[in-house]
Structure formats: C-alpha cells, structure tokens
Image (cartoon, rainbow, N blue to C red):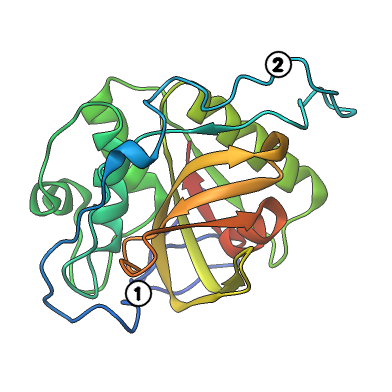
Amino acid sequence: MNPIIHKSGLSVAGLLVAGGCALGPAVAAHAAPVHTNPSTFAPAGRSDKANNGGKADKVGHDRRAERLVGVDYQAQPNFFYCGPAATRMALSAQGKAISQDEVARLLGTTEAGTPSALDTTRVLNELTGGGYRTTEIPDPVARPDQVERLRTDVMKALDAGRPVVANVKGTAVDTDGNPHSYEGGHYLTLVGYRDGGDTIRIADPADPGNGEYWMPLAKVANWIAERGYSA
C-alpha cells in the first residue's frame, strides 16, 4: 500500500496526504507572477561559503557548512497553484524553463490543490532525469531521527543543485519572528541551508512580499509533519 495517499484532502488511516494551497495576505487571487533576482543566491551546485574545515557534530555534519541554490522565484498566481509554483522554482535551478500552467497539468493540480508529495517527486524526476525521492514524516510532531533525516536529505539535495519541494500544514515562525500560516496545506521550496543544516532557507510562492526567509530545521520538520517532501 502506498504510504502517501490523497483522498478528499483528508488523512486516511493516519497516513500522509497533501492538500490545498493558500495565498498570503499580500497576494491577490489572480495576481501576476512575481520574480526576484536569482543572483541573490549562489549558482546551483556551488557553496556560497566553502567552510569545509568546521567542527563536525556527532553525525558528521559540518556545523559551519552552508549553501544557497539559485532559483527563479515566481509567486503563485492563484490560491491553488502553490504546488506548481514550488515545483517550478525547483526546476528552474536545474535549467528547466517551464510555465506554472504546464507544471500544474503534469501534477494534476486542480482547485482542490496538488494531490501529494508523490506527484511533485514524479514530475521533478520526469523533467530532470531522476534523483528525487519522496519522504514522509507521518507523526504529528517530527521525531529527532526524522529531523536528522530531513537535514541529511536537504543538504544532500542542495549540494547536488536540487532544491527540495516540501508539503506543509499549519503555522511556523521564521528566524525573524514572522509567522507563516497555512492551515489548509501548502507547498514551498527549500533552497538553502546554513549552520550545518540547522537553519533552512525557504522560497515561499505565497509570500512575494518576503520571497524567501530562514527557519530552524526542527520547525521546518514539524511543519512537514503528517505530510512529506521531495528531495
């Protein structure tokens, strides 16, 4: 049985499902896509700071390591296109120029949203030749091992130039103290890490006012809890 199931936007037997999207207060329902300068990020596959001589933690992570991957930021144009927008951003880092409408078609996105992280993984692999896999965090709160798995997956993917697409739900607070609330579910793109993966850079298609923000790893993991990510 597939561990990730979509059925009417509800959890089935406690298993992970995806869901709809939400627009931030600054985004109109049919606003035009918003672009930011991708030069604010380091080019894909290159570390913004090569700190390879830092002290490693008990699982071998360099606590000073950091990386940012360049993406073409584009806001979602309506309330249900977060999946296509987040997936498109991940694709842009890998040289794939494709419209949100085309990504939405491939994902099977409707006004009910994008079915699940299985679909973002499938489309990312179809268009990039593979490398992505879906990981579920089935518990209501991420366990320590699930947090570490997310760290490892994000660092490995970003080191390879592959932004991560995450399906989240609920409210999480970034490092500047700003809350981001998506009670109905949302997709966003993880584009960087610092402090050896303790802090994650998020490109949020529903928040063009900020575009990107940093969030502690454990908060990102708990935001993904009961859902999943493509890395």
Q: Position of residue 105 (x, y in %)?
A: 11, 51
Q: Is residue 214 above or below residue 70?
A: below
Name the secondary structure under disc 1.
Answer: loop
Q: Earlier in the sequence, mark 2 or mark 1?
A: 1
- Residue at image location 36% in from the left, 60% down from the top: 211
- Residue at image location 16% in from the left, 47% down from the top: 103
Whether residue 74 sits left or right of residue 17 in the image: it is left
Answer with the quarter of the image where residue 198 lies: top right
As rendered, which of 140 and 206 lies closer to the eye? 206
Mark closer to the observer (2, 1): 2
Crowd class of label 2 (few under 14; some 14 to 19; many from 20; radius 10 Å): few
Amino acid on which the number 1 mark rests in the picture: Ser
Counting the numbered discs, the total is 2
Answer with the quarter of the image where residue 54 lies: top right
Q: Position of residue 191 (x, y in %)?
A: 45, 42
As rendered, which of 2 and 221 lies closer to the eye? 221
Residue lying furthest right in this view?
58
Q: Position of residue 210 (x, y in %)?
A: 39, 65
Amino acid on which the number 2 mark rests in the picture: Asn
Q: Is residue 71 visible?
A: no
Which residue is labeled 2 in the image?
52
Q: Is residue 171 above or below residue 187?
A: below
Q: Residue 8's mark?
A: 1
- Residue at image location 11% in from the left, 40% down from the top: 98
Q: Position of residue 86 (x, y in %)?
A: 32, 52
Whether residue 51 sits left or right of residue 111 in the image: it is right
